[in-house]
Image (cartoon, grey):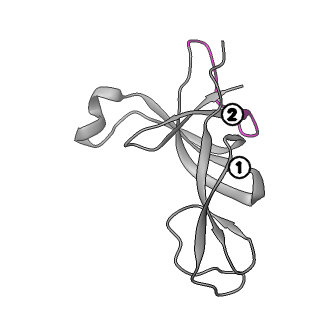
Amino acid sequence: MSRSVENISVEKCKGCGKLFMSPVYVCSACGSEEFEPEVIEGEGKIYTHTTIRIAPEAFMDQVPYHLAIVELPHNLRLTARIDLKEGEKMEIGRPVSCIRKDDVGYWFELR
């Protein structure tokens, strides 16, 4: 059963409205240095992915774990953990939904 979809926090340029993942300091479209917080729906698709089997010491107890670059609306991408269930397989283009954010970052599940 799917969980509720979490929103993703982004930055919106006050000059032209272009959206960016945080942090951003200068708008690449118009040069503005002024931004405001915005949220977008946490649904996207897998752009690319990998499974980590040898991790830094702080994450060794979590191997293997799954990472993906998730393509979001508005041409945004972010690196996220993928919460795979038994028998699920990550595939490029597969739809995903954001299920939570913690100190590691955003977590998604397959749809």
Residue kind at label 2, given as amino acid type: Val
Q: Which residue is mark 1?
A: 72
**Residue 75 colored magenta?**
no
* Magenta-colored span: 86-95
The answer to whether residue 56 is left or right of residue 103 is left
Task: Find residue 102 and name its label.
Answer: none
At horizontal 62% and vertical 21% (from top left) the residue drawn is: 3
Q: Is residue 36 above or below residue 45?
A: below
Q: Residue furthest left?
A: 57
Residue kind at label 1, given as amino acid type: Leu
The answer to whether residue 16 is left or right of residue 98 is right
Q: Position of residue 86 (x, y in %)?
A: 56, 12
Label 2 and label 1: CA atoms lie apart by: 10 Å
Which image quarter: residue 58? top left
The answer to whether residue 56 is left or right of residue 78 is left
Q: Which quarter of the rendering shows the N terminus?
A: top right
At horizontal 57% and vertical 83% (from top left) the residue drawn is: 33
Q: Position of residue 52 (x, y in %)?
A: 43, 36
The answer to whether residue 11 is left or right of residue 44 is left
Number of other residues with Cα within 10 Å of mark 2, as a class: few under 14, some 14 to 19, many 20 or more: many
Q: Position of residue 61 (x, y in %)?
A: 28, 27
Q: Main secondary structure of the magenta part?
A: loop
Task: Find residue 96 and name its label.
Answer: 2
N-terminal of the pair, mark 2 or mark 1, is 1
Q: Which quarter of the rendering shows the C terminus?
A: top right
